[in-house]
Amino acid sequence: MRKLLCGIVFVMLLTSTAGAISARSAVVLDGLTGKTLFEQNTDEILPMASTTKIMTALVALENGDLDRVYTVKKEYTLVEGSSMYLREGERISLRDTLYGLMLMSGNDAALAIAGECGGQEQFIQAMNDKALELGLANTHFDNPNGLDSENHHTTARELAKLTAYAMENEEFRKIVGTQSYTMEGRTMTNHNKLLRLYPDAVGVKTGFTSRSGRCLVSAAERHGRRLIAVTLHDPDDWNDHISMLESAFAQFQEYTLHLEGQALGEVPCEGGDRAVLPYHAQRTLTCWLTPEEYDALEIQITGSRFVYAPTVSGDDYGVISYLLNGRPLMQDSLLFSQSASMLPERRTRLEIILEKIRSFFDRL
């Protein structure tokens, strides 16, 4: 770990391999850094089936009114495949439809969301625009549900990158991490069995068509770190995801960044009985990192270049921040370790000044 006050960023590269899995294409990304922790034929362009709905949900969340209630049109119900069983004429909110989209993998929900958020063509264009915005050059959407189409495709790496971005959205995380959701007239159970099979799983989406095979995107969190795993065309996806995630998490270990009360520096003191004042950490900070990440950590201390007496031991001085690839990771308050009193002569001068001020106003 390096102490850098000038904000220089050291880029950490981390790639590892694990045992072969049954997927045609697979990847595990670190959700914080975006670094590849496991990869297998990661950049092959392939169909993605219902993992498409990650983008469908994201575009709806960023552009739609979740509390708006709409009337289900017949055209939304006339679609093959998995369904949340929307009924023509029923009234339902966009929020409830999103749960049907992500838990039940409703193709009808996808059509309804697109239809109610600007119309099918406009919504699909918004999906492709978002892909371009995120730099997903090999990702293209022909529909909002993931049914087979010639120009509907992605790569495992780009799907993981999209998911890492989507998981930054609080409402998205809440939806995909829900195992069961009850609304008026129906109870929906999440198709993502990994939420029940793997204790650290927090989402996100299954998929299957005859062309794409089994597709799965998962997210898991342990010790404050979030990993994103993707498999495309994988007949043993549940077991493969558990294996990949365990292998990736094993690359991390716990580091103590500093201890409660640990001396971390000192600052010049003006007008006091001490020339400098030491400061210390308020609390112990620990973090799970790879060894490479630990070596690349930056420390940034924010505080005054000097302080004036009087000061009291335990008062706030500033903040210490730990940065990983330029992004804030953790921070703690810095407290003065000693007190500083004003020098007697400086106190006397101050008293004289105050007395002159009082005398001036007394004469007014």
Image: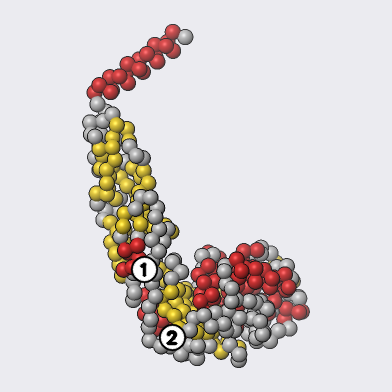
In the image, taking residue 36 as reference, residue 233 lies left or right, namely right
Give the class, few, some or many, for how many residues have Cα within 10 Å of label 2's Cα (few <14, many ≥20). Answer: many
- Taking 120 as reference, is 287 left or right? left
5 w.r.t. 359: above or below: below
Residue beneath label 1, please?
223
Front one among 257 and 100: 257
Circles 2 and 1: CB atoms closer than 8 Å: no
Numbered disc in front, either 2 or 1: 2
Total labels: the figure holds 2
Outermost top residue? 363
Residue 196 at x, y percent in the picture: 45, 80
The kind of secondary structure element at disc 1 is loop
Residue 247: image quadrant is: bottom left
Residue that carries the numbered disc 2 in the rendered image: 240
Residue in the picture at 54% in, 68% down: 166
Residue 296 in the image: state x and y as whole percent. 35, 62
Q: How is the image coloured?
A: secondary structure
Q: Position of residue 164 (x, y in %)?
A: 50, 70
Q: Quadrant of residue 288?
A: bottom left
Q: Residue placed at 61% from the left, 69% from the top? A: 132
How packed is label 1: few (under 14 Cα within 10 Å), some, or many (20 or more)? some
User: Who comes first in sequence, dot 2 or dot 1?
Assistant: 1
* Residue at point 30%, 60% (across, down): 1
How much space separates mark 2 and mark 1, taking CA atoms? 22 Å
- Amino acid marked by disc 1: His
* Depicted 38 relative to depicted 64: above or below: below
Return the x and y of residue 253 as percentages of the image width and height.
Answer: 31, 70
Give the residue type that dot 2 points to.
Asp
Q: Does the rendering let one see residue 111? A: yes
Label 2's element? helix
Residue at left offset 27%, top offset 43%: 266
**Residue 87 visible somewhere in the drawing:** no
